[in-house]
């Protein structure tokens, strides 16, 4: 299967310049993707262009990840309805460093001539004077050509600064520089980048009398029409400090059946036979969520680690499956609060616990159950658990029961949880 064929069946192909497939078939090629350093972490929406680079390398070509130290100072207008706030150099450098670290988890930097490379376009723009740029670059691209781009047309009514208008020239020059200095003839990106990418191929044709190519992937949308990669809390980030491995794993585990087949093709390296087998098994028993589990495990392992994946699975089982007190006690405070996010809470004083409280009193004084009679009835039904263990009315709650020295987890039945904060 050629790269184009693989991208197509995985749902990663929107458009490509004629001749691209022949170029990639004739010789080991060089291709790049640019990343916009607007944050110090990539989010899962950025994973589509990352996977383009991964597949490029797997098919025997050299991938280059360009982090936009220069273009980040300008701001890409593509898909934007208003002018973006410009970044200062300190923030930009912090963002670049964070993204570089994440890109290194996906690409192989020790593969001979096909080794991945990370470049920063600030390196070739820092000493490029304005007059030199408009004479040597701007001369080759007409205003009419630039005005025809969707990123410009969509902003003509509301207005666009010269800074953002010039962005396509800056990105176009990136392609020219890589063409001349890295033998790079292919640029890839999301379909919203088509205009910027083809400005680069046009600049290479006009200024260098060369031929260059392009591949774009479709913008990923959920089956319900919403933009992919968002959650109730905003972006789903690759940085564990912004989105924990547990929440990251949960995001993929909760992908809808309508989106799971698409996502497992795009975001994992499972081959066609394995994916089709998983789809058949999933269709036979959707309740097991085999597609979502395979997807969540694969991508969490890649973005974080095997250890983080195990912890995320164990944490998930505490809430949704079989677990033990030991599993619960293995959670640190932040993991515990993440697993039980949104669960109702009450409080007790540490002095009350130190004196030893009967279970009935804990159930009512914390606010979990409304009365002593309700507590007695629940205990008689054997439906009360403390820290995931069934318990009877004779139990006195002490400091030894506290999780992370400050929490009690009460449960009635299978799904009715309550957290007691002991202060």
Image: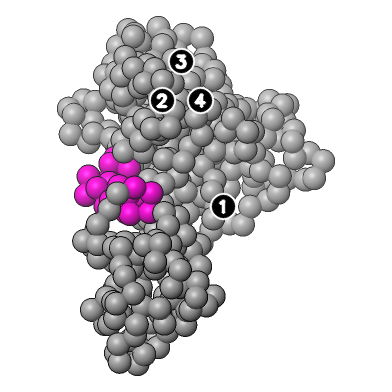
Kindly report the distance in space between the C-alpha atoms of the residues bearing marks 4 and 2: 31 Å
Kindly report the distance in space between the C-alpha atoms of the residues bearing marks 1 and 2: 28 Å
Q: Which residues are magenta?
A: 299-321
Mark carried by residue 137: none
Compare residues 224 and 73 and report the one nearer the observer. 224
Image quarter of the N terminus? top left
Mark nearer the viewer, 1 or 4: 1
Mark carried by residue 285: 2
Mark nearer the viewer, 4 or 2: 2
In this orientation, does residue 274 appear?
yes
- The residue that disc 4 covers is 217
- The residue that disc 1 covers is 232
Which of the marked residues, 4 or 2, is nearer the chain's N terminus? 4
Tell me, yes or no, whether the two marked residues, 1 and 2, touch with CB atoms within 8 Å.
Answer: no
Secondary element type, mark 1: loop
Q: Position of residue 405 (x, y in %)?
A: 28, 78
Tell me: residue 211, above or below residue 184.
above
Q: Is residue 391 left or right of residue 214?
A: left
Mark nearer the viewer, 1 or 2: 2
Secondary element type, mark 2: loop
Kindly report the distance in space between the C-alpha atoms of the residues bearing marks 1 and 4: 25 Å
Secondary element type, mark 3: helix
Tell me, yes or no, whether the two marked residues, 1 and 4, touch with CB atoms within 8 Å.
Answer: no
Tell me: residue 276, above or below residue 299.
above
Which of the marked residues, 3 or 2, is nearer the chain's N terminus? 3
Which residue is rendered at x = 50% and y = 72% of the image?
374
Q: Position of residue 396 (x, y in %)?
A: 29, 81
Which of the marked residues, 4 or 3, is nearer the chain's N terminus? 3
Mark carried by residue 8: 3
């Amino acid at each position: 299967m050629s790269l184009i064929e693989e991208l197509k069946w995985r749902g990663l192909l929107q458009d490509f310049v004629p001749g691209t497939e022949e170029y990639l078939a004739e010789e080991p090629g060089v291709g790049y993707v640019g990343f916009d350093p607007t944050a110090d972490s990539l989010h899962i929406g950025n994973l589509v262009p990352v996977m383009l680079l991964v597949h490029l390398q797997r098919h025997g070509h050299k991938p280059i990840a360009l982090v936009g130290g220069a273009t980040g100072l300008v701001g890409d207008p593509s898909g934007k309805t208003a002018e973006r706030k410009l970044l200062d150099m300190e923030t930009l450098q912090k963002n670049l460093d964070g993204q570089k670290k994440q890109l290194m988890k996906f690409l192989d930097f020790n593969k001979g001539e096909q080794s991945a490379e990370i470049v920063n376009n600030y390196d070739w723009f820092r000493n490029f004077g304005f007059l030199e740029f408009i004479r040597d670059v701007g001369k080759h691209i007409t205003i009419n050509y630039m005005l025809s781009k969707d990123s410009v047309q969509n902003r003509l009514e509301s207005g666009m600064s010269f800074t953002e208008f010039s962005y396509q020239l800056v990105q176009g020059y990136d392609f020219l520089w890589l063409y001349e200095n890295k033998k790079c003839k292919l640029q890839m990106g999301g379909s919203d980048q088509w205009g910027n990418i083809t400005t680069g191929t046009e600049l290479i044709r006009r200024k260098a009398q060369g031929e260059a190519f392009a591949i774009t992937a479709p913008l990923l949308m959920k089956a319900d029409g919403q933009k992919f990669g968002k959650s109730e809390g905003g972006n789903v980030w690759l940085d564990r400090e912004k989105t924990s491995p547990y929440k990251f794993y949960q995001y993929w585990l909760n992908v809808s059946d309508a989106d799971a087949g698409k996502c497992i093709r795009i975001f994992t390296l499972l081959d066609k036979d394995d994916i089709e087998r998983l789809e058949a098994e999933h269709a036979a028993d959707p309740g097991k969520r085999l597609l979502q589990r395979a997807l969540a495990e694969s991508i969490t392992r890649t973005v974080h680690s095997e250890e983080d994946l195990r912890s995320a699975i164990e944490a998930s089982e505490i809430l949704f499956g079989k677990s033990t007190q030991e599993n619960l006690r293995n959670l640190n405070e932040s993991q515990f609060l993440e697993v039980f996010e949104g669960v109702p809470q009450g409080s007790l004083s540490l002095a009350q616990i130190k004196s030893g409280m009967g279970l009935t009193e804990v159930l009512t004084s914390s606010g979990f159950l409304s009365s002593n009679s309700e507590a007695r009835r629940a205990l008689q039904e054997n439906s009360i658990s403390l820290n995931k263990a069934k318990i009877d009315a004779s139990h006195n709650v002490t400091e030894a029961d506290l999780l992370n020295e400050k929490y009690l987890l009460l449960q009635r039945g299978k799904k009715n949880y309550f957290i007691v904060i002991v202060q």
